[in-house]
Image (cartoon, rainbow, N blue to C red):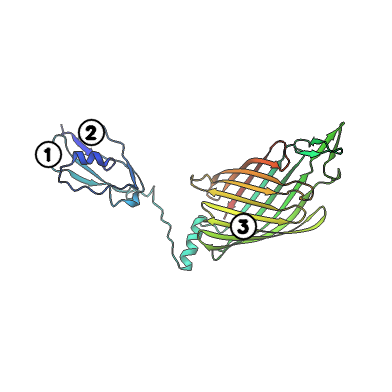
Amino acid sequence: MRSMIIVSTLVLTALLALAAPANAQEPAPSTDASVFHPPVAEAPGGAPLELHASIQGDWRLEGVYARVRPLGSTAPWTELPFERLAATSDARPHPVLVTGNTPELRQQERLARHCGHRSSFEARSQYTRYGASLVDGPQGEDLLTDPGSDNFWSGELEYTYRWLTFLYDISFGVGVMRGHYATLTQDGQTTPWGGASAQDAPGLNYGYGGATLELHRAFSIAGRLTLGASEEGFAAGVGGLLRIGQIAGTRLEIGGDLMQDAGNRGWMRFAWNTVPHVPMALSFEVNGWPDADLNTLGSRLMYEAGVELTPAGPLLAHLGRATRAQAAEAGWVGGLSARYEL
């Protein structure tokens, strides 16, 4: 029968100090890295013994070692180094993103953000339903609009090509927006509020083009020009965006749109990719859609969460809360978006 051995690791430096001889030279513990090692209770004699450890922040350590000796022995400890699993197996390689100041290296870094894809198609749609609002009646009395009568929906289809230079990308798209004015029901008769006729339905058909400039790997700006037609005729608009953080990583975006007939919009959006294959975002927006002349200012608070069904792109769901400046109750927002990379 083989003699029993004891094993110590760098998981708990205090235990190592108690077990090792007084004159042993211990490596300085790291406060920025942690090692988790499930202890082995027993092992068959005559067979190799494998120890496994999970290391958080391993790049901060020069090495991790297991120290062994027979139980009860006073012989010096035998020190055995741990090896990275990727060094002996191709199943779990450790990726390293190479950055640099040459145009070629910067372009390779940008391409790696999008998993080697330069082009993408994206489709997105949203529906916003506001709650009842408090308005003035014909005699100056307070009245409530019909719940859900104030609503609009929108859809867009967009193509993006990434140059991955200072001109990071260009995009082109088409879209449509349709809505309904809030209505009042009195004495069994329903009429639009605010002077709109019963036949009016605000809307916009449009096309747009935009471009993104990456001023720094953590700072970029984008612009957009929109041309379209509403029920009142030709409409044009411009938009802009400022982004802090990497374009395809964790980032804060602040932007706005100025659009004839449909109304203006401003928003702030924080997006993060910290959960693998589950992109998420939280945004707040104020707008006058679908018709700034007859609608009071509206706001929307939205949460987005998605899943990468394939490496080519994610499917995201949008859920949120919508309200008007004179709202008596809140409404809701729902939507979907999908992207395909190639």
The three-letter code of the residue at mark 3 reads: Leu
Q: Which residue is mark 3?
A: 241
Q: Answer with the quarter of the image where residue 174 lies.
A: bottom right
At which x and y percent is residue 192? Answer: 83, 41
Disc 3 to disc 1, C-alpha distance? 69 Å
The three-letter code of the residue at mark 1 reads: Thr
Task: Tell me the number on the disc at residue 35.
Answer: none
Front disc: 2 or 1: 1
The quadrant of the picture occupied by the C terminus is bottom right
Front disc: 3 or 2: 3
Task: Tell me the number on the disc at residue 44.
Answer: 2
SS state under label 3: strand
Disc 2 to disc 1, C-alpha distance? 24 Å
Q: Nearer the viewer, residue 240 or 335?
A: 240
Residue sitting at x 66%, y 55%: 256
Q: Answer with the quarter of the image where residue 323 lies.
A: top right
Whether residue 48 is visible, yes or no, is no
Q: Nearer the viewer, residue 174 or 35?
A: 35
At which x and y percent is residue 37? Answer: 31, 39
- Judge left or right: residue 199 versus residue 108: right
At which x and y percent is residue 328? Answer: 72, 36
- Judge left or right: residue 191 versus residue 224: right
Q: Are marks 3 and 2 in contact (CB under 8 Å)?
A: no
Q: Which residue is mark 1?
A: 74
